[in-house]
Amino acid sequence: MIKPLKKAVLPVAGLGTRFLPATKAMPKEMLPVVDKPLIQYAIDEARAAGIEEFCLVTGRGKDSLIDYFDIAYELQATLKERGKISALEALAPSSMEPGSFVAVRQQEPLGLGHAIWCARSFIGDDPFAILLPDDIVKSEKSCVAQLVEAYNRTGGNVVAVSEVPREQTNRYGILDVGADDGKLVEVKGLVEKPNPEDAPSNLSIIGRYVLTADVMKHLSKLERGAGNEVQLTDAMAKTIGDVPFHGLRYEGTRYDCGDKAGFLEAQIAFSIERPDLGDAVKEFLKKYTA
Ligand code: G1P
């Protein structure tokens, strides 16, 4: 029987070194794209896939992420008193059902696999989604919802994948591909950040996963991989053969907001289609590109 997917883990313990000094005293996941923090994009996408329970894997200096999902009584009372209805409405997505949101700390930066292992009590035996909030995916249907649809058919593990230029394979988890219908691909193997000459394909994993709890027993060995870190990719690779494993060529565009250029592109992509901003954005794009 395929268990329904209700849980998501969001690793947010990273130091955000690529955005210093902006991230010296604030989590990078609170950086806004237009007017919404990165973390909110990930939560919205997960909710659109029917996910109801969330676990943030945080680190020191990241507590404002937890405050962000709390009730802001004074702010809300003041907005209400002043009749600022649209501002109040903007706060709604950051409210959480009581008890549906937990945070655990990854005390040491030992890798993505280690971060996910830190959420093992939250996961128990249930399937779960992972969303890396650095990646935002702009799509008609939530990317995680697309993964969930595939998972409901195939069971097992389903990861979101897209083709990258060969020379970039060393930035991603890369698939060794079996049967491929153009959309769903069977995963025969996985390698974390291989050099282009060693990469089994150019199909890369983006920061969206639906996994069964089977991965946890491999993570719990805390074996180090690429970069001397505990790699999620390595633990996932060990589940091949035990559970079905597929990559899904999702529909949508991914913006790597962990990278300055990707972050700036996302600002344009998300603002240009807004009724309140689109015309202004088009105007100044013309001005600066003329
Ligand atoms: C992580 C994963 C990698 C994946 C990538 C997607 O790498 O380890 O397999 O392709 O996220 O963004 P990171 O970006 O943390 O180096």
Image: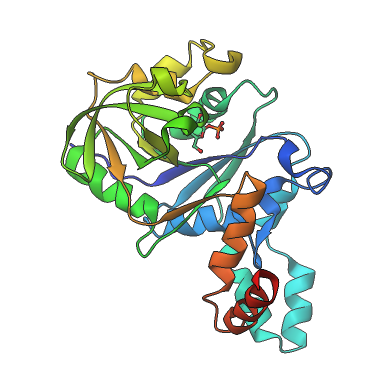
At horizontal 65% and vertical 85% (from top left) the residue drawn is 85
At horizontal 24% and vertical 46% (from top left) the residue drawn is 150
Which one is nearer the viewer's eye here, 109 or 255? Answer: 255
| Colour convention | rainbow
Which one is nearer the viewer's eye here, 265 or 14? Answer: 265
**Horizontal arrangement in the rendering, residue 66 relative to residue 133 (left or right):** right
Say if residue 66 shows up in the picture: no
At horizontal 72% and vertical 83% (from top left) the residue drawn is 80
At horizontal 71% and vertical 85% (from top left) the residue drawn is 84
**Horizontal arrangement in the rendering, residue 129 relative to residue 16 (left or right):** left
Q: Position of residue 178 (x, y in %)?
A: 20, 27
Q: Position of residue 222 (x, y in %)?
A: 52, 13
Q: Quadrant of the N terminus?
A: top left
Say if residue 23 shows up in the picture: yes
> Where is 246 relative to 263, above or below?
above
Q: Quadrant of the C terminus?
A: bottom right
